[in-house]
Amino acid sequence: MIRLIIILVIAMSTFLLTGANNKKTDTQSAKKFCRGYSVIEADKGIDCHGDTIRLVKVSGFYERAI
């Protein structure tokens, strides 16, 4: 009985250790496609990459300054 329990524990740990060796998910980064920005002040905003951008008010709405 003890031998059977030990064999089962070794088999389960082997399956867990071999399943953890997945290189595809570790090296693959998710590509994020985003457009737009968030207004944080009257003339400043943050784009989707976290960079601060300058905004100008055109017809009552804020747009990116060129």
Image (cartoon, rainbow, N blue to C red):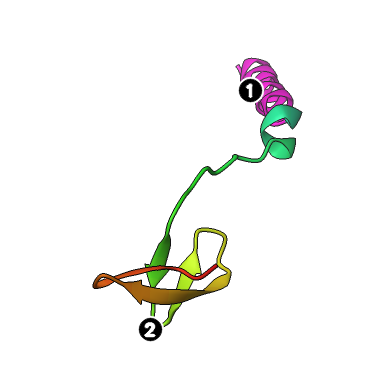
Q: Position of residue 56 (x, y in %)?
A: 41, 76
Residue on which disc 2 sits: 41
Disc 2 versus disc 1: distance between alpha carbons?
56 Å
The residue located at (71%, 38%) in the rendering is 26
Q: Is residue 2 left or right of residue 56?
A: right
Q: Is residue 14 magenta?
A: yes
Using the image, determine if residue 22 lies above or below residue 41.
above
Asked if residue 60 lies left or right of residue 23, the reply is: left
Q: Earlier along the polypeptide chain: callout 2 or callout 1?
A: 1
Residue receiving disc 1: 12
Say few, some or many: other residues with alpha carbon within 10 Å of mark 1 (under 14 / 14 to 19 / 20 or more): few
Q: How packed is label 2: few (under 14 Cα within 10 Å), some, or many (20 or more)?
A: few
Q: Position of residue 29 (x, y in %)?
A: 66, 40
Image point (50%, 71%), residue name: 65
Vertical side of 28 occupied by 53: above or below: below
Q: Considering the whole magenta stretch, tell me its main secondary structure.
A: helix
Identify the amino acid type marked 2.
Glu
Q: Return the residue nearer the eye: 11 or 63.
A: 63
Region of the chain picked out in magenta, as a range: 1-20
Identity, as a three-letter code, of the amino acid under mark 1: Met
Q: Position of residue 66 (x, y in %)?
A: 55, 67
